[in-house]
Amino acid sequence: MLAFGIMSLTLESELSYFTEIAMLAESCGMEVFRFIPSHINPHSLHVKGKKFDSKRKAWVSAEFPIPSILYDRCFYGEDEHSKQCLPIVSWLKNQKDITFLGYGLPNKLELYHVLKNTPLSPYLPPTQHVQDAKTVIKELAQKKKVILKPIGGAHGYGIYSLKKNDKTFLVKTEKQKQMVSRIFPNEAKLHKWLESLITKRQYLIQPYLELVTNELEPFDIRMLLQKDEFGNWGELGRGIRVGNSGGILSNLSAGGTCKPFSEWISKLPKTKAEYITEELDYILSELPHLLENAFLPLFELGVDIGIAQNGSIWILDLNSKPGRKVLLQTRPDLKDTLHMRPLLYGKYLSQLEHLERKNTYEKTLSH
């Protein structure tokens, strides 16, 4: 049987998703293992983790060789364990007898610099690296309202909106699903706060886009692309994420809700609905090959699209390790397909000659 390994930073992470995959594995002639990268023994190249027992339909503790097909679901933070696991995963990506379903994408700034030289450039919000507090204050003076995002952030964590009023500055963020606001009485106080913020992590700055419903709820479109059992890209579905009124995030992890894309677009005027659908289809037709030409092969891609009140369409985020909540909630009929896809694509990769897959290593490895 083919050994299919799933990596995460904790054994509790996405457990229900991994179990659903494992329940289907036997029908594909595969065994499923899950483990934490830091639990690999560097001498024996064995790892202590969990193996799915198909008879008992349960995970059991086991020690096993590193599986030849790996599905990387590690979400790195600023913590020590993330820093410990990152080089281990990079080492695994260089092993000739190990194949990853997808090799990930670089940070938001690198993605922007690559895509701004492609036909998708008009869909990218103008983006620059925050070098210092002066960068932010200068942009605020010109645009009155901006967004700060961590360069390596995910799930909407650490995003701030900043607004310049006549003399004061309003800063908003969302923490634990609650809106947190702070008013700075002058530029000097804001400058001091910004300096302390950007010494902790790197940020990028973008103009603030009015991506809200008529009820002032932030919203975006989440689309999921995956490769099938023949290695071909296809869209699995799309859904609408809606945040809390007056908030800045639509992420479900920040308390947002979701609804079917078909329900949302059916309420728009026909010409507008057709225009949006054509634009989204065009973006999805271009994105996968542009990314894979620039970086290493991928298996799946979460694409977040914002539609501003003036009708402009923006690529907000690209995620090589997307969640599935939006689709599972809006399209429950896709459940088995979503859980079978990683196995079928893993089987496809195992049948390819290694050289065909590995020739991309001349490119820089990115996590």
Image (cartoon, rainbow, N blue to C red):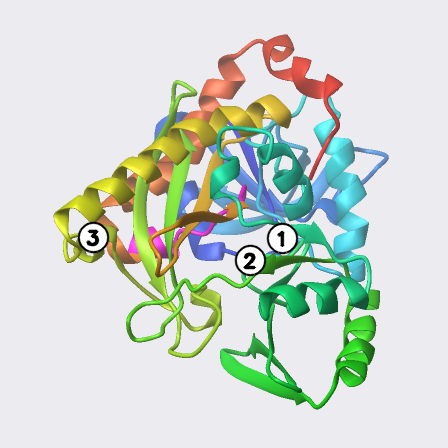
Q: What stretch of residues is rendered in magenta?
A: 319-328
Q: How many marks?
A: 3
Q: Please identify, in this view, whether the residue under mark 3 or under mark 2 is nearer the observer.
A: 3
Q: Which residue is mark 1?
A: 75
Please name the residue that numbered disc 2 is placed on.
13
Secondary structure state at the residue bearing disc 2? loop
Which residue is found at the position 45% from the left and 19% from the top?
Answer: 348
Badge 3 or badge 1: first in the primary sequence = 1
- Image-based side of 58 in relation to 168, left or right: left
In the rendered structure, the answer to whether residue 237 lies left or right of residue 12 reads left
Residue closer to the observer: 75 or 65? 75
Residue type at tag 2:
Ser
Earlier-in-chain disc, 3 versus 2: 2
* Label drawn at residue 290: none
Q: Is residue 1 visible?
A: no
**Residue 310 visible, this orientation:** yes
Neighbourhood count class around disc 2 (C-alpha, 10 Å): few under 14, some 14–19, many 20 upward: some
Q: Within the magenta stretch, is there residue 323?
A: yes
Q: Position of residue 19 (x, y in %)?
A: 43, 49
